[in-house]
Each structure stands twice: as structure tokens, then as C-alpha cells.
Amino acid sequence: MAAAAVGVGAGARGERLSSSSPTAVGPQVDAGKYVRYTPEQVEALERVYTECPKPSSLRRQQLIRECPILSNIEPKQIKVWFQNRRCREKQRKEASRLQTVNRKLNAMNKLLMEENDRLQKQVSRLVYENGYMRTQLHNPSAATTDTSCESVVTSSQHQQQNPAVLHPQRDANNPAGLLAIAEETLAEFMSKATGTAVEWVQMVGMKPGPDSIGIIAVSHNCSGVAARACGLVSLEPTKVAEILKDRPSWYRDCRCVDIIHVIPTGNGGTIELIYMQTYAPTTLAAPRDFWTLRYTSGLEDGSLVICERSLTQSTGGPSGPNTPNFIRAEVLPSGYLIRPCEGGGSMIYIVDHVDLDAWSVPEVLRPLYESPKILAQKMTIAALRHIRQIAHESSGEIPYGAGRQPAVFRTFSQRLSRGFNDAVSGFPDDGWSLLSSDGSEDITISVNSSPNKLVGSHVSPNPLFSTVGGGILCAKASMLLQNVPPALLVRFLREHRSEWADPGVDAYSAASLRASPYTVPGLRTSGFMGSQVILPLAHTLEHEEFLEVIRLEGHGFSHDEVLLSRDMYLLQLCSGVDENATSASAQLVFAPIDESFADDAPLLPSGFRVIPLDTKMDVPSATRTLDLASALEVGPGGASRASTDASGVCNRSVLTIAFQFSYENHLRDSVAAMARNYVRAVMASVQRVAVAIAPSRLGPQIGMKHPPASPEALTLASWIGRSYRVHTGADIRWSDTEDADSPLALLWKHNDAILCCSLKPAPMFTFANNAGLDILETTLVNLQDISLEMILDDEGRKALCSEFPKIMQQGFTYLPGGVCKSSMGRQASYEQAVAWKVLSDDDAPHCLAFMLVNWTFM
């Protein structure tokens, strides 16, 4: 390979010939070793290099013929020049890359050193507190009220958790009062971002490094839930601040952010009064809203800081809007610290600290509001990922796809996610209203007769949203899943659409893009759907989200139907399908599109969202129900049913399904009936798929095994069986298919739901077999939070109250069939119920047992 040489003289460029070449006949030859080119020759060669860095032999000869100033240069010398030019280009790129890596490493080193200093301070504080507690335990009389040794951080944290000082109300007409709140917020935020006000624990699976997203930590033992991130991006601080303030662009759960009032401050900053609404993650919970003060200011070291907190009675400030159907949540001091890096770019510190009022949701859903890991994934990490994505798009490192810029695909992803959230939440101010049910509460039907409110002015007019006398209809439902990883389920639904989708419904959705949709499907059996082809469009840097076009092949239509192309197209967004990555949820959202696929095409998203319900890791053993959670272990490693097993698979998750259809008024009832039946069929298919792909079916190494024969569990099982025999004169009719070697195994695998509840002070459930947990849609750990009164309907409660004296006197009774409700609100029917008093070995009443015979979800 020829090497590059620096030319001598103004505008000259020397190129070294290979040693085997003869003396070159060029413009200037230096002892047969170097060929010197004039500036005009170099300029001509550079123009060609820009168009073609590696020209062929014919192209080089053509160049000599077409360019007179190169006519006296041999083709071999031209070849050497291009070789050397490519070598110099490669060296420049490598040098630039190494400089970039070096800057990242220096910045990351500085970040890690600051993190190490913060951890050292946290260790020192914990050591001091530990010594102080030891002193108090060994010498109670030494207790003193002197808190001079306590750190300012500890004091501020105590005040935060126990707000006792009530500030006078301060309104927007008093900037000085609001500035005082802003300065307090800034101090508390900085103590969390760079200090020890919150005990941070590094998030599992998020290792720091020059190419990683950053250092991610979550809170431990603090009020509310909090997450913290430190990362590097190649954007300037002002651009980063602009992106972070535009919260709806990166926070997918954010519905709207309204800046009510802006007040400039004397130090060059701004105070903003903000009202924000967020979507509900599932149909089983209410959405949240926030009333906050946001303070933007510059620091002496050139950093930008944006901090925020809720305005409440304890903090002072004006009261915010009171919107019905929303639960007011609180933002504790949070924000962003943006520091400029040497050589360009920014170092970002993000702190999100909120109190989402977890007690206002059903117990089974509280992990969604109590998990700092979910907060980190939805907000903190999402913000960092969005900034890094824009940085890569700005640098040109992401190639265009399908002739569109990356920002266009990002907009499509946001519209799909937002449209699905709008369908799940169904806000009345968007035009949604509930349609009367068919007597069953498993499916909710909402209609919107003014859908233009949802799509906005940026979407072009389309028959989908402008049909005279029509609108949009949404059928939605939520359900609890057991023992199925969300990523695995969503990936299966994405790759095997034919397992759950009805081609007739797909055809109806596609036809809705035309001027007049054809008749409502339902009895149609033709049009078998063949294969699907996934055409990738774009993905995020870490491949946590994919945007793709799905082509559905093999549709046939009869002559009386609207003429459609044989192939159908869906725009699809898939996220959270990597089982090895930490994710807050897995989602599959799709919308029909036509072949033109315009940038402003209207979208009507439908799909699935699966959110893992991680149980708390610090659940004290005292809260276990009869210690049967440890007795009824499944899988290797002794993981209980309510926690994560040894393979890291979350045992519980909540699935939300929402499907949208356009309709004409004269077909609304027919479309509603079709949508209700279709979603029920999809739910049944998903349940079947979940059972088929559950990890227990994937291999014997993690399969379900019989519960071990612990003394406590065996004792309760024997008491239940013996008491039933004593009171009724017969044994429980066990299933013939069960091959169990212990009474506990027989009880656990019995087909009918067997539930035990305490006698006093209130009839709370203490144990359930496998079928009982399924009908309640809960786990052994959470079983004690469900009362008998919660699951029975009015008829069931009346029947139990009338028969309760008989149970206590005779020991048992038979109750008529009825309907009960699970912890997720789903209804299940049973043919008959048997209730009996469970007696201990000394014949003392221990608990009540119920057996629900031949139960099924309605």
C-alpha cells in the first residue's frame, strides 16, 4: 500500500510511488519517489473523490482524457493518489473517533468520580447514624434533643417526609413568594441529584460506560418513588433543556402540559406554573394530574438547572385547576441539571420523585405506582433515550429509511402510542362516552362522535374521520396474567398474528380507510388470511422500540364487497420485546394504512399492552399468609408464586386490550356487537397463547412441581379434608386425573376453587388452592388483602348471611350457584358452593372453607 507524504511548496501535494514502479512521467518527479501535484490537479482529483472514492481503471483513464490538466499523469499514479487519499480519510475518521471516545471517557470519569464522592458521603452518613443508633440502644438515658451533628441533608429529608411548616398562600401576583418556593425547590433538588438526600441504589442491568445510556439508580426507603440518571449526550445544554421541557414528546404517558403563567426572575431565570395530565396505564385505574411550579435558572459554573415541585397547602402558592375524573398526584422536588462538557456536549443529571397516591388503586395494581423501577423506565430513562436519539439523528448517524427522515418515524411512533392511550383512557373532553353494556362487565365499549379532536390539525382530511353521521368505537378490557413474561407474550403476538386475529375484522378496518366501509363482519367465513410480512422502518438506538409495516397477504373478497387490494397494510409499533433488557412494559400497537402511507395519514391505533406487576422486594415475612407462600413453592430456587422466580420471570402482569373501529350511525349497534365479541375472542386466544408459552411449558427445568410437604401446609390440608368428611360424611371428590402423593398436592391441584378465610375479626382470605387463586386473579402473598365480602355479589352475601348460623351449628351448608368478582373486577360464575367449618386437632374452629364448584369466567 502506498503511503501519504506532505508536499513541499504552496498548494503542492506529493504522493509516494510504490518501489516497484518505474520513474513516473508526471508534472514534477522527485528522484523517482514522489510525484508533486499542482493545486489545480489536486482540486480536480478531490472533485472526483467526492463523487467516487474508489474509481475503477476505466474511470481513471476516462478522467485523464476528460481533464486536460491531468493528461500528463499516468493512470498508475492516479491510482496511488486515490489509495493515499482513502488512507488519509480513514486516519482522519479514526482520529476523530478516538478524540470523541476520549472526551466521553474523560466526562464519564468525572461523572464516576462525583458519583464516588456522593457514595462516600452517603456511607459516612450511614456510619454516623448507625453509631448514633447503637449509642441509643446501649444507653437510652443518653438521648438528647441536640441535632447539631445531623447533616443539613438529613434535616431537609426529614422535613420533606414530615411537612410540618405551612407557608402562607402565595399567588402569581407575588413573584417574590414564588421565587422563595423556587429557591427551596432548587436546593432540595440539588441535594438529591448530587447529594445524599435520597438513598440511591443502582438499578440492576444498567452498567455505566462510554457507550451506555448512563448511570441509573432508584430510591430505597423514601417517601414516594424516585429515580435518578446521569448520562452524556452530544448536544449543547440549551438544546437539551428545550427537549426536556417538551415532556409530551418523550413521556408517552403524558397527555398534555399547559403552562398557565410565566414569571421572569431577577436572576435571569423563569418561573412557570404548569398543569399536567397523564394517561392511565390500564382501564382498571384512574389517570393522574399534577399542579407544579417549574424553575429554570443558570448556575455560576455555566450549568443549566430545571427543577419542579407540586404546589400544595404545605408548600404554598396558588391552587391549581380541579379536574374531575383525575386523581391529583404530587411531584416532590425533581428536575434536570445540565452541565456543559469540554469539547462539546452535555452531562445530564435527572431526578424524578413523585407520590402517585398508590392507595387509590386496587391492591393488585399498586406495584405500578409503588415501583421506582417502573418510574425509572417510564420517565427517567425515557428522557435520556429520547435525547440520545435526537443527538444521533442530528449527527447524521442514522440513515434515512423509505425516503423519510428519522424524525418522521419518531412522530409516527408518538402518534401510535398516543392514539392507543387515548383509546384506553377515553377522556370525555375528547368526545368519548360509554355505551351501555350487554349485561356483562368484562368489555367496555366507548364511542366518539367527534374524532377530529383526537387527531389534531396536522392530519389531512380522510373519510376515516369525516364520515357523515359516524364516529369511532373502542372496545377495551384488562385482565391479569400469571407466569408469562410480557416480552415473550408480545413477541409471540407480533410474530403469529394469525393465532389471535380475525381476517374479516382486519378487512373491515382496512375498508374503513375508504369512503364507505362495507358491511359489518361477523358471519363471514371467506377471506382466509395467509402469511404476514414484516417490513422494518426504524428502531431506536437500543432496539427497545421498533416501527414497521405489516403486509397481510392472501385476502380474497366476494363480488358484493368493496374492491380492495389483495394485500393489506398495518403500521405497527412494538416495544419491550427484549427479554434480557429491563423494561416497564411490552406493547404492540397497530393501525391500518393505505399504500400511499402519507406523512399526515390518519391513524386509528389498536393493540395490546402488558405491564409486569413486580412485587416489593422488601416484603416482611410477617405479612405472609400462614407462611404458605413459602410452603407452596414452584420452580427452582424456591421462588414463591407471588415473586420473581430464579429465571427472573415476573409471575404477574396486567394485560390491557383496546381495539378501535370507525362506524356509521345506522351501523353503530352492529359494530359494537362485533367489537365486543371480537375482543372477547381475542382475550380467549391470548389466554390460550399465555398458557401455551408459559415458562413452565418451555422445559422441565422450570416446570411446575408439587408443593413440598411442609408441616404447616400438610396440617392445614389434612384439617380441611378431615373437617369436610366429619361434617358431610363423605370425602372431597378429588379429580381422577390427579396423581398426587400428599393431601396438600390433592388440595392444591383440585379443579374446583377451594378458599379459606378467617373467622374473626373479619372474614379475610388466608389460603386458596391453585384454582382459587385463578378465580380471584391474585397470589398467595396478596390474598390476605381480599375479603369475602369483596368477591360476593348481593345475592351471595344474602345467602351466606342467612346460612352462617347453620355453618357454625351444623358445621357445613350448601349454597346456591351465583356470581363472584375477582380482584381485577372480572366476574366468574359457579354452579354451587359448599361452605364448612375447618376444625383443628383439638376440634376448635380454625377457619371457614368454601368450595366453588364448576366455576368459569363470564
Image (tube, rainbow, N blue to C red):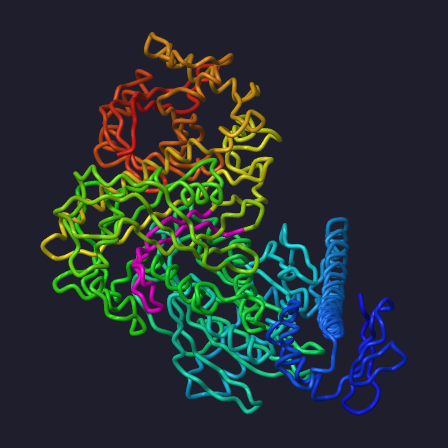
Give the position of the C terminus as an image quadrant: top left
- Percent across and percent down for residue 351 are 58, 66
Q: Nearer the viewer, residue 188 or 565?
A: 565
Residue at 79 percent of width and 92 percent of height: 10
Residue at 67 percent of width and 69 percent of height: 194
- Percent across and percent down for residue 147 are 70, 67
For residue 61: magenta? no
Give the position of the N terminus as an image quadrant: bottom right
Using the rendered view, name the quadrant where residue 53 is placed.
Answer: bottom right
- Percent across and percent down for residue 373 are 55, 53
User: Is residue 828 something one can see in this rendering?
Assistant: yes
The magenta stretch is 583-611
Q: Nearer the viewer, residue 300 or 149?
A: 300
- Looking at the image, the residue that sits furthest to the top is 729
- Percent across and percent down for residue 488 are 48, 41
Q: Nearer the viewer, residue 174 or 738?
A: 738
Residue at 45 percent of width and 88 percent of height: 174
